[in-house]
Structures are given as C-alpha cells and as structure tokens.
C-alpha cells in the first residue's frame, strides 16, 4: 500500500513499538474503542516529524466522525497503537475525542427487564 496508510508496516514486528515511541498505552486512559474522533478544522498543520500513520489518521477523521476501532481498521493497525496516536493528536489539538454518552435507563425500563428475567 502506498496511500499513506499503515498497511505496508503490518508485517514488521517492531513497527508498533516504533510508532508509539515505546509507549504501551495512551496518556488519556478514557480513550476506548468506541470513542468518536473528529478532526479540528482550524488546527495548525502537523509538524514535519509526524508519522505517516498520524497524517493518515487525521485525514480519515477529516471526512467526518470516526470511532477509534474504525480508524484502526482503516489504518490496518492494532487498536492499542491507534489509541496512542489518537492521544497524541488530541493533546496537540488536531483531533477532538468524544466519549459515547449513555443516559441512565428509566426505572420503568429497569423494572421491565427485571420482570422479563424473572419470567425466564
């Protein structure tokens, strides 16, 4: 692959280590696989030292909202590596991350679920 994605690196065992600078996890532990990503429209350009994978990730998120898991699939990289790259881009203001917000279920719904379980 020569389209800027990481597919050409997947057979190299040291590549994820190199991409993350030896880090095993993102600084922001709240980044899950379902975290939604969006490129910041007026962010400064990435530095010349940015990896091709970071650039590809930023391009992917520029087309709309994308989850961490979807980005990993597009980049053909492990989710753990993408979480670290995302954390770096969020810290520099290039990406915005939105954790999924779940509203609490109503008491009526909880009672219906409990009744359904009891009926089993």
Image (spheres, helix red, strand yellow):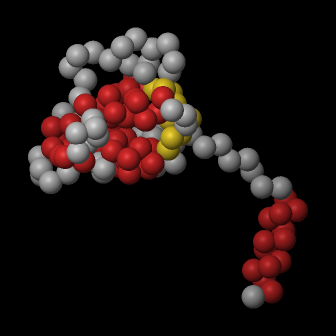
Residue 25 picture quarter: top left
Q: Position of residue 86 (x, y in %)?
A: 38, 34
Please state the horizontal and vertical placement of residue 83, each as a whole percent of the image.
37, 41
* Residue depicted at x 15% and y 38%: 18
Task: List x then y, in percent, for residue 54.
Answer: 31, 31
Residue drawn at x 23%, y 29% as measured from the top left? 51
**Residue placed furthest toward the front:** 2
Q: Indicate whether 94 appears above or below 73.
A: above
**Any part of residue 31 in sight:** yes
Where 107 falls versus 12 (above or below)?
Answer: below
Report whether 7 appears left or right of 93: left
Quadrant containing the C terminus is bottom right
**Is 10 above or below relative to 66?**
below
Q: Nearer the viewer, residue 10 or 36?
A: 10
Q: Quadrant of the N terminus?
A: top left
Q: Residue at x 84, y 68 (%)?
A: 111
How many numbered circles does the render carry?
0
Quadrant of the rendered image containing residue 50: top left
* Left or right placement of residue 14 versus residue 64 in this view: left
The structure residue drawn at horizontal position 88% and vertical position 62%, both measured from the top left corner, is 108
Is residue 24 visible from the viewing direction of this image?
A: no
Residue 67 point in image, percent of width and height: 50, 44
Q: Most extreme residue toward the bottom, as rendered?
A: 120
């Amino acid at each position: 692959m020569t389209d800027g994605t990481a597919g050409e690196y997947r057979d190299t065992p040291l590549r994820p280590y190199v991409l993350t600078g030896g880090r095993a996890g993102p600084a922001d532990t709240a980044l899950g696989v379902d975290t939604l990503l969006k490129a910041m429209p007026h962010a400064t350009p990435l530095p010349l030292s940015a990896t091709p994978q970071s650039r590809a990730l930023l391009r992917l998120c520029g087309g709309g909202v994308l989850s961490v898991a979807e980005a990993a699939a597009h980049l053909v990289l492990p989710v753990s590596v993408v979480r670290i790259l995302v954390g770096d881009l969020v810290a520099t203001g290039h990406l915005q991350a939105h954790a999924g917000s779940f509203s609490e279920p109503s008491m009526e719904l909880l009672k219906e679920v409990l009744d359904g379980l009891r009926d089993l």
